[in-house]
Image (tube, rainbow, N blue to C red):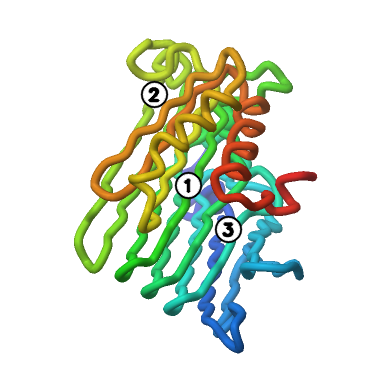
Amino acid sequence: MHGSLDPNPVRADPAPRRQRSDGRVRLAVGPIGGATRIRDLAESGPLRLRFPRGDGALEAVLVNTAGGVACGDCFSVSLDLEADADLVFTTTAAEKVYRSDGPDSRIGNAVTLGAGARLAWLPQETILFDRARVRRRLDADLTGDAGLLAVEIVAFGRAARGERIAAGLFEDVWRVRRDGRIVYADGFRLDGAIGDLLTRPAIGGGARACATLLDFGPDAEARLEEARGFLDALAPPGIEAAASAWNGHLAVRALAPAVGPLRSLVGRFLAAYRGLPMPRVWQS
């Protein structure tokens, strides 16, 4: 029996491209009748903003209906505060960045503050799963005496499951400008064997979680000793935390063996430093 070459062989279909999430929110707020109100709001993809009623500043809570960040997802948040607006931004829960089989996820945040505006950027922690790959960036443009208070907490692995990050990518870039001039630029990148890198004394000293808090308020640099006093009083054993101030702003950095105690410290520090309770979602 002799076979013959089929001129039209059946070929396996190429693997379909995975559907990725592309979530965006854009919010503009301004003062109306003595209170900060929504001027414009646009939402797309799985990102939504919710606005709990309460006294004081307007509060915006980001909800990711996708349940986390998967490989190749792109998310962005844009906030525009008119002069003298007052806004608190937070998230409904910790943001989870899942394992990637190659593509990087990207998170881009941009805030613009008019003169006299105040923004408290207070998202809950970001949890990186083993082999997660994410690039995150925050760009802030401040006008005149606008004030920005921003905090970010990152957990390397799920402590409740005893997970240790063997490898992955975490890149975090901050750029802050006042009246068009850069006043703060920072870049943090861990690529490859993240778990091993974090054991190095010059990088993490064995830490499994880190936090960065930056204050760009008009009186931020003058509050250095006050901030150090709060850290001395509130930081539990096992957490390394320090504050410094230069170029008109204040920075607090902390390292911890687990995210739970670090989150608690950040919440108590912020409540004392701001003289205001944390958003309700932080207390749930």
Identify residue type, mark 3.
Answer: Ser
Q: Position of residue 272 (x, y in %)?
A: 60, 42
Disc 3 is placed on an element classified as: loop
Q: Is residue 241 left or right of residue 58?
A: left
Disc 1 is placed on an element classified as: strand
The numbered dot on residue 21 is 3
Q: Earlier in the sequence, mark 3 or mark 1?
A: 3
Identify the residue at the far bottom of this view.
33
Disc 2 is placed on an element classified as: strand
Q: Earlier in the sequence, mark 2 or mark 1?
A: 1
Identify residue type, mark 2.
Answer: Gly
Q: Are marks 2 and 1 in contact (CB under 8 Å)?
A: no
- Quick check: 209 above or below 35? above
Q: Position of residue 87 (x, y in %)?
A: 56, 67
Pointer 1 residue = 105
* Residue 193 visible in rendering: yes
Pointer 2 residue = 192
